[in-house]
Structure formats: structure tokens, C-alpha cells
Amino acid sequence: MRILLIRPNSIIIATPVPLGLGYVASYLLSRRPGDQVKIIDARNLRLSQAQVVAEAGNFQPDLIGISAINFETDQVHILSGMLKRAFPHAPVVIGGPYASANRGSILEQDPNIDYLVVCEGEKTFCSLVQALESRSELGGVPGIFFRQDGKVKFTGEPEPLPNLDELPFDWELLNPRSYFQYRAGGRNSQNIVKHSSKTLTMITSRGCPFGCIFCHNIFGRKFRKRSADKVVDEIALLRDKYRVEELEIVDDSFNLDLARAKAICRGIIDRKLGLHLSLPNGIRGDIVDDEFLDLLKAAGFYRIAFAVESASPRIQKIMHKKIDLQKVQWAIAETAARGMFPTGYFIMGFPTETVEDIEQTIAFAKQSKLSVASFFYLNPFPGTEVAKMVGEEKVSGKLFRDCSTMTVNLSAVDDQRLHQLNKRAYREFYLDPARAWRTLKLVPKNFRTFVNIFLVFKLFFQDSVNQ
């Protein structure tokens, strides 16, 4: 079977390699080596939808899979319609966070989409392909939505893959060197500052037990991890085969197993891999000790992100994160003291959040040794716990653009005041001469850094800067 996998283009600036599509393709080919699989990353290549369809025409797919996040809603539906008209015989399958969050409503609204794959997609997508090819009953494939007798059916939640070390991954399927090229309007990583354009992204664990109410929870609550040796082997492969100079690890909970995180650092140090490393997704800031920070520094990590979200203890309880804010402040200060680049992520607009709650968050950021802070608006995506808390009808049908755009305000603060607080947070955090001087000494001195300084300045006055 000829299978085409697509990441759509969008206004999103960050364009790391689409690891999800890489894992789906690798798993499929390990079970069905006779298939032909092509991956089109339209965001990386900045392809228009017409160009994607033209590329698909050169391949002539028997089945089309599209992976997307909620910020790509419009692109998914427009592209699905164009592909269905061009290839009416090819089923269209949607996966990724958008499918997992919105589920059956996607099939109810869009006749151009035939199937949804939710949660972890590797085994489910492979089983779906096999069932379609053999014309088997789809009810025996957990993790899919499909239509039957005019109704949308769901086959039940899939079981998470138990052993991530056994999960195959073929980097060649992603053409990793194509991500080293500069493309106007984008960057090849989640990381906002970089030392090198020869950057790739990897993931070393799945699952998070903390249950934050705004999380998609695609990988489940059980923390599953790749062994430290396997992780270090892959880092060495990327350096030696593709000449990678920088690597970002995008786990949700890289340091949840602190002993394993330390072992990865020791492996990098012992093998003298000599890369610039970052953790841009945000580590758990209260699972940190001096030894871990020393190992991060020695291994080559230069940017560590801390996902604080809110400095209000009341809001911490509401969001189910319940992080130790005092310990996080200590970890941030110690990260900065070691010459690394601490970044903080904060969110405004939680249910019942007051001006006083937001003031606590702003004060926490200002008093910290963070070099960079992002003050996002809450995005209560359908299917998340926060959407259920306030009622799915409040978020259904909303077009979420990005984390810096206020789409739905669930707080106790009116829209205008929330916007003012957000802009004030940026100005008061960054217009601190001591912080500015400290940060300028740490950041890589290159064009990408200059661009991001400009984008931060825009956030003093406006919301989305992705255009």
C-alpha cells in the first residue's frame, strides 16, 4: 500500500521534525515492510495546500494520514477536502492532538475525513491499515473513530505501548538534514534561542502522572521511559550520522525519573558528545537537586525551561499541578548560577482566576532569576479537563490560533483587564536592566536571537506575533 503522511503548513513558527509521523511510519514499516510511505512536512517546506496536493499527486497514495494540533484546525479541513477531491479512492485519516481532543465531532462535521486515530498512533494506525487492506471489521481496532450506518462509532481507548525501547524509529524517513536550512518565517526547533542551525528534536519518555487540567493527555498518566543507554546511543547517532550540533529534548517529564535523567547526562559526558542541548518543553521544577543541575551543565545543556504556569497556590490546586513554588524558585536561581539559561512559562486565564492571582504570577516571574518568560493565555481545548469543568459548549467551535492569543477567557477578570495584565507582565519582566544585561551575556549572538528580541518587544503591546 502507498501511504502518505502529512503535517500541514500553518502560521506556527516552530518547525521541529515531526517525531510523531516518524514514529508512525517507522512502526508501520517494521510490521509491513512491503508498504511505501512518504512524509510531507508542509510546515517545514512552507508548502501551500495546492502544493501539498501536487506533491501527493506525484506519489498517488492509497491512504492519506494527516497529523495536526488544535491550532491547525482550518488547515486540516481545507486540506482534507482538497485531497479527497483529488484522490476520492484514498481514505483520509486524522491523528495527533487535534483528533485526540475533538474526537467524533470531527467526523460529524467533515465528510472528507474518514477515520480518526486517537492517543498514541503507532500501533493503532498500523492495525487500521491492515484492517482496511484486508476488509476486516474495524471494531477490533482500539483507538479509532469511524462511520457505520450513518453513525460515528468509537472502538475504545487504546493501550499505551509498554516498552518504548522496542519502538522503532528510522530517521531517514524524515530527511533530517532538510531541517538545517533557514526558511523565512520559521525556525527548526521549539527553542527560541539556538547556537546552531544543525538542530534536531528527540523525545525520551511518554506520559505524565500530574493531570494538569489544560493538557491533552495523549500519552496517558503512566510515565514510560526509554533507557538511558538507548537515549545516549540515539544522540550519538544524530551527531555522527547527521553532524547535528544542537539537540532539544521535548519530553513532558524528562526529570520525573531523576536517576534516569542523571544517567543520560552521565552518558553524554562519558562519550564526550559535545553538543549544545536544551529542554524547551519545561521540566518539573521541584524534582531537581544540585547534582542534577551540575550534570546538566557538564553534559552541554544551556537552556532549561520551567513550566510554572501560575504562582498562585489556589490556582495551582485548581489546575492539579500543585508544584512546590519555593523549590522552583530555588531551581531557577541555581540554574542561572551555573551559567545556564532559565526560561519560565506562565499561563493567565484559569477558571475563577482573579487579578490578585495574576499579580502573584507576575511577582514570581519578576523576583526570579529567569532570563526569559512567556506569559500565555489559557487555551481550553475541547476534550481537556478544563473544558469539561466549564462546559464543552463554551469552547466547542472556537478557533484557537496560538498560545499568545486570547480565544476564551474563563477567569474572573474581564477581557480588557486580562489583556492589560498580560502586556504589563511582559514589560515589567523584560524592562529590568539587571535581567537584560544578564540575559544578553548568556544568549547565543546570532540572527535568530535578534528576531526573538524583536518578537518579545512586540508582545509588550500586542498578542499573537506569529504573523
Image (cartoon, rainbow, N blue to C red):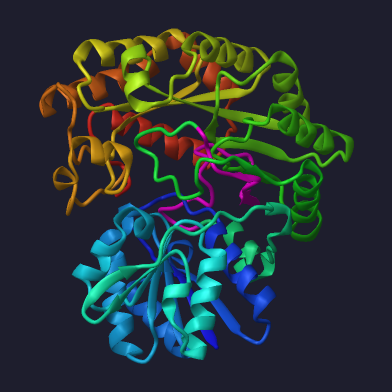
Left or right relative to 63: residue 266: right
Query: Can residue 209 be seen in the rendering of this structure?
Result: yes
Q: Residue at x 17, y 41 (%)?
A: 391
Quarter of the image where one finds residue 420: top left
Residue 231: within the magenta? Answer: no
Most distant residue in the right direction: 270
Above or below residue 443? Residue 142 is below
Query: Can residue 312 be seen in the rendering of this structure?
Result: no
- Name the spot of residue 228 as percent of width and height, x first: 77, 41
Closer to the camera in the image, 31 or 446: 31
Q: Residue at x 68, y 60 (%)?
A: 167
- Name the spot of residue 40 as percent of width and height, x first: 49, 72
- Name the spot of residue 273 as percent of width and height, x first: 82, 42
The secondary structure making up most of the magenta span is loop
Closer to the camera in the image, 6 or 274: 6
Q: Residue at x 64, y 69 (%)?
A: 26
Above or below residue 226? Residue 123 is below
Quadrant where the N terminus is found in the figure: bottom right
- Name the spot of residue 83 as percent of width and height, x first: 33, 82
Quarter of the image where one finds residue 367: top left
Left or right relative to 429: residue 168: right
Q: Residue at x 89, y 35 (%)?
A: 270
Count numbered badges in the picture: 0
Residue stretch in magenta: 183-209
